Every structure is written in C-alpha cells, then in structure tokens.
Image (spheres, grey):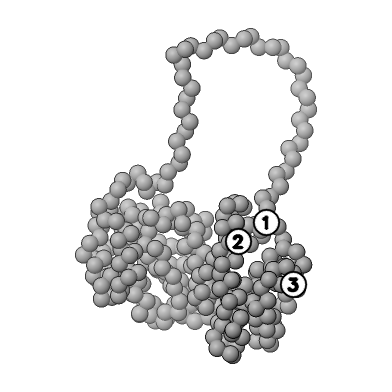
Amino acid sequence: MSFANTEVLTALGGWFRPLIGRDPYNKKSVDTAQEATAKAVGALEDHFLVNTYLVGERLTLADIFAAGIISRGFQYFFDKEWRSNNPNVTRWFETVTNQSIYSDVAEKLEFIEKAIPNQPPKKEAAPKAEKPKEAPKPKAAAPKDDDEEEAPAAPKAKHPIEALGRPTFQIDELKRKYSNEETREVALPWFWENVNFEEYSLWRMDYKYNDELTLTFMSNNQIGGFFTRLEASRKYIFGAASVYGSSNDSLIRGAFLVRGQEALPAFDVAPDVESYEFKKLDPKNPEDKKFVEAMWAWDEPAQPEGKEWADGKVFK
C-alpha cells in the first residue's frame, strides 16, 4: 500500500492532473511524471509475473487500494498497445476490479484504444481589432545620449525566506537524523539540544474541515498532495502531519519546524494553505514540546480527542 501511495500515486498524479485541469501544464513535469509512472508500474509488472496478487495468492486490501490508484492510468493513458506490453498488470487489474467488493462500489472502467494526449491548453484567438485611422506621424525622437543606459531587467523573484540569510542550524541535519535514527531515543533529544529557536519556530497545524473527511487513506493522500505543493519551501520546513481516528471519524493534525518566526512565508506556496490553521508553539513550554514529540513519533493518540494514529506523512 505504501508503494502504491508514494510511488504510483505521486507519479501518476503528476501525469493526469494537468490533463483534467487540476494542475497547470508543464511539459517537463509531465514527461518526468510519465517516466516515473512507467518505472513504478514496471516494478508491478515484474511482481505479477510470478504473483497473482500483491500479497500472497489471495485478494487483500492492498490490491483494492492499489487498483483504485492505478485506475486513473487505465482511464487516460493505458491504451491497447500499453496493455499488450504490460499483460501482468492488466490481468491483475481486471481480476481485482471484477471482484464484487470492488465492482459494487465503483463503476466498470472501459479500456481505451488510444491514450489521451497531454498537451498545453489552446490559447484563445484574440478578436481582430478594427484598423485605426492613420494618425499623423510623430516627430522623430531625439537621439539617445551615449551616456544613457537601458534599465536593467528586474531580478528573478526569490523565496521570501531567503531574505533571512543563512542560518547557523541546518535543517537538513535534522532531516537526516530523523530518517536514520530512532525518533524518541535519538532524533528528538538531538533536535531539542541543537536547534536555534532564534532562527526557527515551531507550529501546530490543524485541518479546518475534519467533518468532511471520509476514508483515512484518502485523508492521508490529501496530506501528500499538500506536501507536494509545498515543494518550493522544502529547504525551509521539516515536520509531519497525520490522520487520527477511523474512516468518517478522523482529523488531520501536524507539527512543523519553520525557518523564521512566521508560518505563512513558508506555507503560502501551497494554494490550499487556507484549508489549514497554524498556531505558534513555545519550545520552552513542556506541553508544546510533548505535542511536537507525539506528532513526530506517531506513537500516541491525538489529544484531547483520544483518536488513535491511523496514517501519516513526513515532510523532509
């Protein structure tokens, strides 16, 4: 399930979202997503050469979950030629989607003959302007003074956090420590001992519309999408967000370390930032420290709701 969620969904989403208008079209990004999809699905093709299902020889939740993700590929891109070249994935997909546990809740997907091309939107033709009446010719402009210089081009816009300068604490060190060491035993003590809170701040994040959340895996995908849209701020943020609770009774919550003393300059790069509420935490407050540790260790229920941890993602 993790492979389908992180490798297949991310790549396939970058391929089909511009096609349906959910993301702006960028040829390089689409080509990269297409190549990543081919690599991820290629791994599945090899797996299904000797396996009927993802886990063992019986249908499991992993198959249903993965089939729902990969269905977008069959809907838009996996045409007759592709299916001929990938018979194992095609066989597995048909087997899973024809099971009543899947087909009772999802419409049957008709296979396509030709892939739908992913291309930039057509520009609307500008209406023809009426030919203006001939105006008197202006007098010749005075010659430019040799000392005059053209105005320099405006500098490329930089990330607002760049103005803060280079910090003494490098956030990449924290990301490596978190990835390679035990969270409670090593990474968190190292974090509190080394981070410079004059350069960084801690923030609690809560999703504003928890009553609209349904399946927990879909909520976790939502976190993944939000993190994807934070890419421009990756070198200024570290943190984790999780889904707590069960399907149709859950919440999204997280904790983040951010360069600077304000959250918005880092998170404003994501268009859906307005769906989240941010509250500044005090690193000297024991309760705030406990909250951050629970959000990053994933080993305690959400408080005060008491909802158990279900799934989560790390932004690093």
Residue at mark 1 to residue at mark 2: CA–CA distance: 10 Å
Q: Is residue 55 left or right of residue 81?
A: left
Residue at mark 2 to residue at mark 3: CA–CA distance: 19 Å
For marks 3 and 1 on the same chain, the one whose residue lies earlier in the sequence: 3
The residue shown at (46%, 19%) is: 149
In the rendered structure, which amino acid carries the disc numbered 3?
Phe
Q: Nearer the viewer, residue 247 or 5?
A: 5
List the residue tagged with mark 2. 34
Residue at far left of view: 193
Q: Position of residue 183 (x, y in %)?
A: 30, 74
Q: Nearer the viewer, residue 261 or 121?
A: 121
Q: Is residue 82 left or right of residue 287?
A: right
Reply above or below: 231 against 38. Answer: above
Instruction: Kindly check if marks 1 and 2 are in contact, taking CB atoms under 8 A apart as contact.
Output: yes
The residue shown at (38%, 55%) is: 235
The residue shown at (77%, 67%) is: 113
User: For residue 118, which numbered disc appears in the image?
Assistant: 1
Reply above or below: 153 against 25. Answer: above
Q: Position of residue 202 (x, y in %)?
A: 32, 61
The residue shown at (51%, 74%) is: 3
In the rendered structure, which amino acid carries the disc numbered 2?
Gln
Q: Is residue 51 left or right of residue 204?
A: right
List the residue tagged with mark 3. 111
Q: Nearer the viewer, residue 233 or 303?
A: 233
Q: Mark 2 falls on what kind of element?
A: helix
In the rendered structure, which amino acid carries the disc numbered 1?
Asn
Check the picture and name the quadrant holding the C terminus: bottom left
